[in-house]
């Protein structure tokens, strides 16, 4: 990406952009001057709130509903970006959409396993496929895994396995995009104070997990969005094909 390129002309798509880390990434990229497409699965109200937040500070954003596991709907995210922002293309894709179910391997409902695979594996692959076809030169694809892949916590088997698939894709796609000047990286947060993480956990469990990193706290969506912004920026463009464990030193 040429260093002289003005970030005000650049376009970003964020899946899972209505909540949690995705929402914070939308806000952060909007503050950096990106024109943003906020991809959301079902909560239009939250997605529109993110759009209004960016508009309130002079930025540009639209909300587009899409199931990340459906090729035509993900393609429509890119179509919407090109139609709304002048047809020049998309520079950054942040794939933050995800699903989590926790249970021991012996007890997990296989219907939930299928749902995890559909969103976390197929969805990541579909978004990566469209990104590989349509991100313009100098751009970046940023996907998400989890530090639980390295922590190997009981109860996280199905979720961790689905995110391990995203990690496996990262370097392969980076190499397949040789000559395109496009980076592919995966961010693997540790325990982060989002609705997805906090759901179903009692205060004792949350406190115990917050104490695990040497920094002795949970991560915040803003912590992770800063990593995303770096990888999307010219400063982060030499980082490629990597899984970045943003977790306060937990592993």
Image (cartoon, helix red, strand yellow):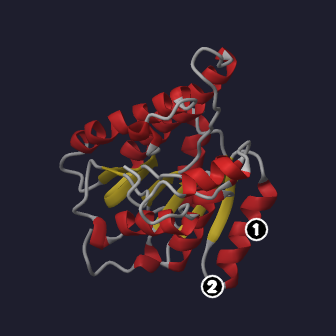
Furthest residue in direction left, as rendered: 179
Residue 189 spot, x, y in % from top left: 47, 53
Quadrant position of the N terminus in the picture: bottom left
Q: Which circle marks residue 49 in the picture?
A: 1
Which one is in front, 194 or 168? 194
Q: How many marks?
A: 2
Local packing at callout 1 (Cα closer than 10 Å; few below 14, some 14-19, many 20+) is some
Residue 63 spot, x, y in % from top left: 69, 59
User: Label 2's element?
Assistant: loop
| Residue 148 seen anywhere in this rendered image of the structure | yes
Which one is in front, 140 or 185? 185
Return the disc, 1 or 2, that comes first in the chain's sequence.
1
Residue 225 left/right relative to 142: right
User: Label 1's element?
Assistant: helix
Tell me the residue that label 2 is attached to.
58
Q: Which residue does the image show at 25% across and 59% down from the upper left? A: 239
Local packing at callout 2 (Cα closer than 10 Å; few below 14, some 14-19, many 20+) is few
Q: Which residue does the image show at 65% across and 19% down from the upper left? A: 108
């Amino acid at each position: 990406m040429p260093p002289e390129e003005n970030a005000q002309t650049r376009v970003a798509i964020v899946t899972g952009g209505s909540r949690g880390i995705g929402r914070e990434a939308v806000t952060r990229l909007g503050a950096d001057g990106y024109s943003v497409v906020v991809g959301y699965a079902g909560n239009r109200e939250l997605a529109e709130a993110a759009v209004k937040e960016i508009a309130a500070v002079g930025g540009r954003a639209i909300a587009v509903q899409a199931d990340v596991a459906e090729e035509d709907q993900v393609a429509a995210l890119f179509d919407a970006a090109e139609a709304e922002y002048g047809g020049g293309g998309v520079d950054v894709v942040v794939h933050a959409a995800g699903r989590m179910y926790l249970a021991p391997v012996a007890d997990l409902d296989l219907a939930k396993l299928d749902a995890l695979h559909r969103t976390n594996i197929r969805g990541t692959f579909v978004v990566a496929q469209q990104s590989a076809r349509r991100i313009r030169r100098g751009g970046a694809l940023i996907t998400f895994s989890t530090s639980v892949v390295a922590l190997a916590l009981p109860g996280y088997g199905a979720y961790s396995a689905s995110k391990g698939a995203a990690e496996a894709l990262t370097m392969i796609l980076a190499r397949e995009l040789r000559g395109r000047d496009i980076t592919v990286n995966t961010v693997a947060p540790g325990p982060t104070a989002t609705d997805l993480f906090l759901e179903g956990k009692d205060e004792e469990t949350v406190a115990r997990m917050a104490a695990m990193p040497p920094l002795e706290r949970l991560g915040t969506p803003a912590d992770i969005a800063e990593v995303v912004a770096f990888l999307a920026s010219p400063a982060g463009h030499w980082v490629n094909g990597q899984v970045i464990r943003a977790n306060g030193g937990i592993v």
